[in-house]
Image (cartoon, rainbow, N blue to C red):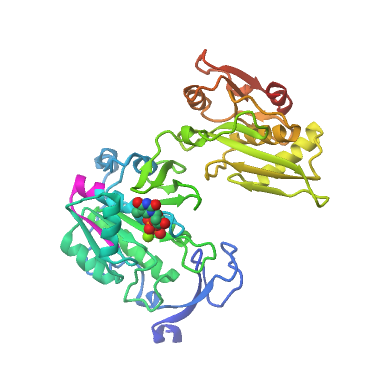
Amino acid sequence: MSIMAAKGSRTIFACQNCGHQSRKWLGKCPDCGDWNTFVEERDSSTAKGGGAVLRTGLRLRESRPVQFVDIEAQDDAREATGIEEFDRVLGGGIVPGSLVLIGGEPGIGKSTLLSQVADRLSHLYGNVLYVSGEESERQIKLRGDRLGINPAGLYLLSETSLERIFDEINKLQPKAIIIDSVQTIFSEKLESAPGSVSQVREVAGQFMLLSKNLTTPVFLIGHVTKDGMIAGPKALEHIVDTVLYFEGERHHNHRILRAAKNRFGAANELGIFEMTGQGLIGVPNPSEIFLSERPIGASGSAVVAAMEGTRPMLVEIQALVSSSKFGTGRRTTQGVEINRVALLVAMLEKRLGFHLSGDDIFVNLVGGISLDEPAVDMGIVAAVTSSFRNIPISEQTIVFGEVGLAGEVRASAHAAIRLREIARMGFKRVIMPQNNLSGLPEDDRIEIIGVRSVTDALDALF
Ligand code: TYD
Ligand code: MG
């Protein structure tokens, strides 16, 4: 027996961003690369042996091997909430017994969204328990009144002790559980502070066992902060079944719910909401909103047909090319990756002879969303060129396609779905990859121009 074990606990240092553990303090995390994230924690859990024991008094169901053919597929068992944008991101509804993590910055609307979900679930499926470690029952009720919800079977519990929460779950036997937030809940069995990586992992691990045993869905809300001082949801991503991130710009009303991981559906699925005075309202036709304030006849504006998950989205890209005061130009982007823009600009310089190195280039995706899809490339190239040459692009024209380093335009996935959305939104002309043309359904509402290179695309555009 080592001295460590005799003491019953040992000191470890854990990265508060990703959960990486080390015996000594480190300035930079070798796992996630973040700086100054190591915090000393007392790890008593390892001394007590293993994490697979439910510490909280619930009896574990015993399991036996079952033959593959005897297992019934469960897909019809999904429980839809009726909040379409939410169900879509989950892959069609809530899977019984799943553990879902919803991360996002403070104030983005996590509690609002989950209050609305709790309301729907309580109407449809029975008792729902909403546990808050941050707000009192009255504060939650106040928000609920503002949202206009009036659920009979919704129970609120203002509590931070994991053990107490499990007691109440045992008594109430709810059909769904919401924990707001995972960083405020702590297990009395661990010595580390609430919000530390060991606590957050312990809480998530215990809820994983609970959700699987009771086949009750559990939603964990997790705060994401940029400086990483609170244990980040990154440390939980591998524990839970599904990870959703709630994003948006503080000064825009649009909120985007994005699946980063989903054991029961496609990752990268998007749900779009608008924050209003009465809570979050789903946006079924995002293209309409993203294009509603488009300037007509202004140079530097291009519309691109992008896809997020299975969903087409037409968005405006704006570029501004202006000569720099300091010899070398800066590149600034919002909503698109800065390296992607730098690469495409370098390609325009090399292949088309544009002189851009002395210019500042700003590229924005309008509407407060961000996209990292390759087909957006053509939109960036079109917007930058339009601003550089100071020639507007026709508002009836739309582009999409990936651009390679040699200036070639590469095929994009789901061309037919993009075209359908393009036609629906009333565009008359699309400039797209030549390689996507074969097998496309006929559509006489739009003129389709297939291109092989950026040179061809710019000839067609200007
Ligand atoms: P909240 O759900 O409390 O955020 P989180 O739980 O992610 O920290 O929402 C915070 C913001 O949303 C707050 O600034 C107020 C705003 N809000 C509305 O605009 N309309 C509403 O109906 C509600 C409930 C909140
Ligand atoms: Mg909240």
Residue 122's place in the image compared with 22, above or below, is above
Identify which residue, 188 or 21, lies in the foreground: 188
For the C terminus, which image quadrant? top right
Q: Is-magenta flag for residue 126?
A: yes
Identify which residue, 277 or 342, lies in the foreground: 277
Residue 52's place in the image compared with 79, above or below, is below
Which quadrant of the picture is home to ligand 1? bottom left
What is the quadrant of residue 92 in the picture? top left
Count of marks, rendered view: 0
Residue shown at 70% from the left, 36% from the top: 384
Q: Is-magenta flag for residue 275?
A: no
Q: Which residues are drawn in magenta?
A: 120-131
Residue 208's place in the image compared with 321, above or below, is below
**Residue 128 located left or right of residue 420:** left
For the N terminus, which image quadrant? bottom left
Residue shown at 34% from the left, 61% from the top: 180
Instruction: Inspect this view and state whether residue 61 appears.
Output: no
Instruction: Inspect this view and state whether residue 297 appears.
Output: yes
Residue 203 at x, y percent in the picture: 35, 66
Residue 160 at x, y percent in the picture: 31, 70
Residue 415 at x, y percent in the picture: 53, 26
Residue shown at 24% from the left, 66% from the top: 166
Residue 416's place in the image compared with 182, above or below, is above
What is the quadrant of residue 355 in the picture? top right
Residue 280 at x, y percent in the picture: 36, 46
